[in-house]
Image (cartoon, grey):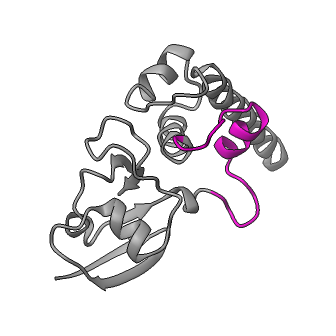
Amino acid sequence: MQVTMTVNGTEYTREIEGRMLLVHFLRDVLALTGTHWGCDTSNCGVCVVWMDGEPVKSCTVLAAMAGGHEVRTVEGLANGAELDPIQEGFRQCHGLQCGFCTPGMLMTCRALLDKNPDPTEGEIREAISGQICRCTGYSSIIRSVRWAAVHEAAAVATEEAVQA
């Protein structure tokens, strides 16, 4: 069957098997290997991408179901060479160790900050509750999200001051 979707702003049309999962379409067909493949049961969260602006676990979405939709992967977070604040937060605060969960964490945390620019620790913990990280103990991830929230707020304040 043929599927067409927009991934990170580029439209793709490909022939696929109807049973192909979105995670495999992204990794194997489009060579976007930033999206990791973990448990295949939606328990670990390493495969999180956005579909129409909402986080989804791509191991439970058929590629055919993403047809006609906008998909954003971790490769779509940075603006050219400029890291997204959540990526920079993970870098600054050591929010990753082995890196396996990082793409899913980044996509989930970016979605959180888009909806709630100043989340509490409890709200961050709730947002990442569908993600498994076996290395960090989550404390550095929470610090990373807080770092991004603070720095985004400062950038907005600066921009507003410049425009005033």
Residue 53 visible, this angle: no
Give residue 133's position: percent from left, percent from top.
51, 30
Tell me which residue sits at (74%, 40%) in the image: 91
33 to the left or right of 142: left
- Residue 68, picture quadrant: bottom left
In the displayed structure, 81 sits above or below 110; it is below
In the displayed structure, 137 sits above or below 45; it is above
- Quarter of the image containing the N terminus? bottom left
Residue 98 visible, this angle: yes
Magenta span covers which residues?
78-101
118 to the left or right of 6: right
Tell me which residue sits at (30%, 52%) in the image: 59
Give residue 64's position: percent from left, percent from top.
20, 69
Tell me which residue sits at (38%, 81%) in the image: 12
- Residue 4, picture quadrant: bottom left
Residue sitting nearer the eye, 19 or 156: 19
